[in-house]
Image (cartoon, rainbow, N blue to C red):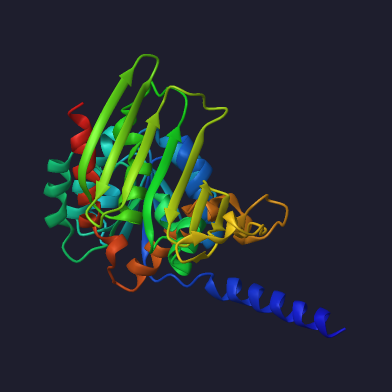
Amino acid sequence: MPFTSWIDKYKALRKQSYLNALNRYRLQYAFIGVGSHSLSNLYPCLENLQVPLKYIYSRHVEHAQKLAVRFPGATGTGRLSDIMENDQVKGIFICSHPSQHYALLQKALQAGKHVFIEKPACYSLAELQSLVPLQKDNVCLVALQRRSSTINLLLNKHGLLKDASSYTYRYCTGPYPEGDALIELFIHPIDNLVQLFGPSHSLQVQKKTGNGVTYQLLIQHTNGVQGMVELSTQYTWNEAIETLEVNGLRGLVQIQHPNQLSVWEKPARILGMPIEKVLQRLAVQKVYLNNRDFIPAEASNSLVIQGFYPEIKHFLHLAENNKKDQRGELSSLVATYELLEQLKKW
């Protein structure tokens, strides 16, 4: 059967593409941190990509040594100097306690390393501005996965937001007593809306506290797009939600992160009169993503859909080729931190 032959050829090409990508890295890397987030989301990506780790660092050296067994040639260490002062280590992955990120990033940049660092890179705009000149010609990619998520890639590929006029964004979780919810949690949706709609021009805020915190925002962006945003830790982690609805000239974009993206097309008008008020027409919904994990393929994997895997691949591509783009620049976070600074005042 010809279709069977085509499918077999496609699978063979896909397999060969993966095999050709293995062991292609010229540089040596190190990883700082052995926490639950890195173990669940970052180390599995590095294993799959067969990234050559020379060192894994943890304050609990026995943890680093146990994990190093999973990476051929890696050594577990409790000394940061093994990484920072080693000229063979060209790139560093940092995923430690958020309060340590600024100091670690500062040391890594001063040591001339390419850096992939989990958010937040720092806690203030002033700290960010002090880091920018230290980057020089090196890559510094801050892990804000929505930038590399399947949904955002599809939004950009198909230009689904180019005629946006307004949006409603909800990011609601349970309480977050272990840290700074604004900088450690809400940086995700804040950065996402800045990436999708541009810097803010004006901002109105209402804040409510008690068993968590809720911010309700009315934002106008410099391009004229207006948004209503709810950021909250007064809901529940079992039913945490992140939704975005965007009203455009041609349709209504509906997003449920990280698995669903669709567009409801608006009916045409005749002399300003919507056809739907005159003639009964079926509503048209275009589904760009509806991931249900039914097909066990790479594109459906949660680490790919959410952006962890492609983000790490992009960092490695930049580091290996000694290139920088907007994603590999700390300065790409300035507009995000400017908005966070405004929210700190409330």
Residue 206: % across, % down: 28, 26
Specify whether 105 is left or right of 4: left
Most extreme residue toward the top, as rendered? Answer: 210
Q: Which residue is found at the position 64% from the left and 74% from the top?
A: 14
Q: Position of residue 313 (x, y in %)?
A: 45, 63
> In the current view of this chain or complex, which residue is farthest to the bottom?
2
Q: Position of residue 70 (x, y in %)?
A: 54, 50
Residue at image x 32%, y 20%? 208
Report the label total: 0
Q: Is residue 219 visible?
A: yes
Residue in the image at 63% along x and 53% along y = 290
Query: Is residue 52 something one can see in this rendering?
Result: no
Displayed quadrant of residue 121: top left
Query: On the rendered image, what quadrant is the C terminus found in?
Result: top left
Q: What residue is drawn where x is 22% and y is 42%?
A: 339
Judge from the rendering whether residue 342 lies leftward or rightward of residue 99; answer left or right.
left
| In the displayed structure image, the side of residue 129 where residue 270 appears, left or right | right
Q: Residue furthest right?
A: 1
Of 139 and 30, nearer the camera is: 139
Q: Quadrant of residue 122?
A: top left
Instruction: Tell me the quarter of the image containing the N terminus.
Output: bottom right
Please state the horizontal and vertical placement of residue 106, each as a whole percent of the image.
Answer: 19, 47
Left or right of 33 in this view: 104: left
